[in-house]
Amino acid sequence: MIENTGGEGKLERIHVQVSPDLGEVARQAADLFVELCQAITGAGQVFSVALSGGSTPRALHQLLSSAPYRERVDWSRVRFFFGDERYVPEADTMSNYRMAHETLLEPLGVDPSRIFRMPTTELGSPALAAARYEDDLRAAFELSAGQLPQFDLILLGLGPDGHTASLFPHTEALSVSDRLVAANFVPKLDAYRITLTVPVINNAAVVAFLVAGSDKASALGSVLLGPRDPDEFPAQLVLPTDGDLYWLVDQAAAAGLAQARPDQ
Ligand code: 6PG
């Protein structure tokens, strides 16, 4: 359940937009991306975005790397990070980096110096990979000890089990608060993932979930309207401290909002 768990105005910064289908969700997301990016780069700043994995972002990437969206952004002032990664080589078909490279970064011709890939198996262990990315974030955002990076936009998806990024139900990373990046073993996948931690996600200026498909309806209903149970539905942990939260969903996924009973 989204509660007003901290300070005035929190609920006013939560925006739920229901679109007919994934294509429209992607257009909503592309419009938001361009709006946020133009505001930052127009002021002479660099726009730092953390990309999401899985399959849903493909539709967004297709729009952003094609006209007219492609021409609306000064891509030379955009830095690309990742919210999470599978612990597989970058050439693996399961790699989130590979998907982003194929569908967005290569088509846009993004200079490698502005792509911050999450390292994986080349470092020899998930823990070393997470530690390296933490170092990379500290350097990229010029952080001093104890500081959190502030992404201008973090894109997220939602799994049918209520996970987001690689914050899966009942896994250790859910409670990590003293690191920026965690190596998270996911028993049900019998695999490690590398993920941004909750404090980093919630320090973002804007977080946008892209959710589409009937297989997400139950999880979306539980996350947004069910009892607060973040260990079971980790996406409930996402509530930016000072930023805005967008849920860009299609009608199929939103069906769960009609079915779910608002928590009493
Ligand atoms: C990943 C993602 C993950 C994803 C959801 C939804 O690495 O898989 O970061 O959190 O966003 O699982 O995935 P789909 O978009 O494929 O449904």
Image (cartoon, grey):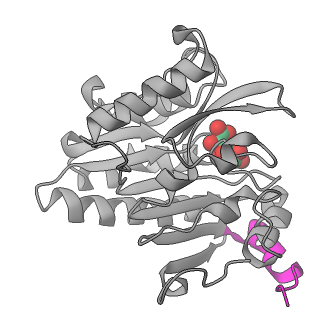
- The relative height of residue 156 versus residue 226 in the rendered view (above or below) is above
Identified at 87% across, 34% down, the residue is 188
* Secondary structure mostly taken by the magenta-highlighted segment of the chain: helix
Please tell me which residue is depicted at 77% across the width and 25% down the height of the picture.
191
The C terminus sits in image quarter: bottom right
- Magenta part of the protein: which range? 250-264
Tell me where residue 166 sits by quadrant.
top right
- In front here: 144 or 5? 144
Q: Identify the residue at horizontal 57%, vertical 38% (top origin).
A: 84
**The N terminus appears in which quarter of the rendering?**
bottom right
Query: Is 94 in front, or is 223?
Result: 223
Identify the residue at the far left of this view.
Answer: 44
Asked whether residue 253 is drawn in magenta, I would say: yes
Measuring from the top left, give residue 226's x and y in whole percent: 82, 76
Q: Quadrant of ligand 1?
A: top right
Q: Can you say whether 136 is above or below 71 in the image?
A: above
Q: Inspect this view and state whether residue 230 appears.
A: yes
